[in-house]
Amino acid sequence: MKTTTVTKRLAGLGGVKWGVYRKARELNQSGAGIVEMTIGEPDVAVSDALIDATIAALQAGRTGYSNGRGEAGLLDALAERYSATRGRDFRPGNFLCFPGTQTALFAVMAGVAEAGDEVLVGDPMYATYEGVVRASGAEMVAVPLRPEHGFRMQAADIAARITPRSRAILLTTPHNPTGAILTAEDIARIGQLAIAHDLWIISDEVYEELVFDDADFTSPLADPALADRVVAVSSISKSHAAPGFRSGWCAGPAAFCEALLPYSETMLFGNQPFIADMTELAIRRGSEAAPAMVERFESRAHLLADRLTTETALTVHRPAAGMFALVNVSATGLDGEAYAWDLLQAGVAVMPGSAFGDNLNDWVRVALTISDTEFATALDRIVDHAKKNTR
Ligand SMILES: Cc1ncc(COP(=O)(O)O)c(C=O)c1O
């Protein structure tokens, strides 16, 4: 069978990283009772209002072809929302709608980088990023995100890796898996580099609405000096607990969106009008689900940090947003991968940090999205296991 180079560039990405997750699923099929803290999905159902809006749109016949950019009502809603939250004027022409952040990111990457280019990506990173960069033909250059800087990407670490082939910096704020949020100063420094070296900034902001109480979110879209080089991607997957609806967008310079439109049309031949209607409502009303998720995830992150810090030698990086916390397991003498397999025997499944890049070998990622009861059980098991396995 002959396949193209893009299939080879993507071969081997993904599968191996999910070993613990898959094993836990398999064991639980036969009733093993493992608490799964591997993947994170919103822990509530989509609101009735959004389900009703979808059904009403379907019944109203909103099932025909749309256009490549998105439905007018949704584009207006996005323009209003981004104008209000970014403090700059956004118009419908600043957006393209896509089935989720992931597709938006895929298309945007194809619009800024190609073979011969380099894209700077923070390590650790969200699981699909390497594939997204490689699919474009470009090469990924990992920029270490360091615990001593709260895992926030530092301009100096980017600067040390910029070459004449650098084309874009991919930011994730708030970040998965670290839960870090870039400060306005971080963004200003990174922005100066982007201007000096004529780089694009792609900003994955899918966790924007899951920012914890004592933290502030700043988008690079808010800086007028960066307006012609920032493209943000996001969706209602996390904010409205609606990942299965696959409804997202990119927000960026009108000329960029215009240039990317044929790519989007070629790929999708338009969005789904009934999903667009539901998303318009979601954007206009804001999220009912997000504040309660924030409260739950934040309090579980605190609980995890408090218990592990007082009762074990494990350390926790406190997230400022999102659905995950990171635990440093070096006190056990195991790396994250070996620890995750060992902890599985004790009835808890977590993601080895190595699944997210080369810089989290001593860490594991814990999802905060399970029920309080399951969370308490998992904590007891993690504490017991740590007490028995600390050097
Ligand atoms: C950082 C990040 N970007 C993108 C996505 C995918 O989002 P969507 O469902 O909108 O495609 C996820 C999902 O977990 C994520 O964590």
Image: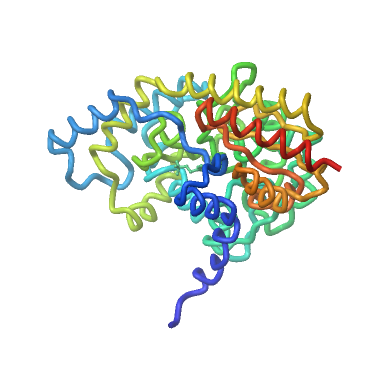
Residue found at the very far bottom of the displayed protein: 1
Can you name the residue that lies furthest to the left here? 60
In the picture, measured across the screen, residue 5 lies left or right of residue 96, that is right
Report x, y in % for residue 363: 73, 43
Q: Position of residue 329 (x, y in %)?
A: 76, 42
Q: Residue furthest top?
A: 214
Q: How is the image coloured?
A: rainbow
Q: Nearer the viewer, residue 327 or 8?
A: 327
In which quarter of the view is residue 188 placed? top right
Above or below, 35 against 336 in this view is: above
| The C terminus lies in quadrant | top right
Q: Is 312 situated above or below 272?
A: above
- Look at 55% across and 39% down and name the residue there: 35
Which residue is located at x 54 percent, y 50 percent?
Answer: 24
Q: Is residue 33 left or right of residue 62?
A: right
Q: Is residue 172 above or below residue 284?
A: below
Residue at 65% over, 34% down: 325
Extreme residue toward the front, this view: 31
> Does residue 324 appear anywhere in the picture?
yes
As drawn, is 236 to the left or to the right of 114?
left
Q: Quadrant of residue 94?
A: top left
Quadrant (top left/top right/bottom left/bottom right) for the N terminus? bottom left
Quarter location, residue 100: top left
In this rendering, the count of numbered labels is 0
Residue 143 shows in this picture: no
**Depth check: 76 or 299 in front?**
299
Task: Give the image location of residue 211, x and y in percent.
Answer: 57, 24
Q: Residue drawn 54% across and 41% down?
A: 36
Q: Position of residue 376 (x, y in %)?
A: 59, 27
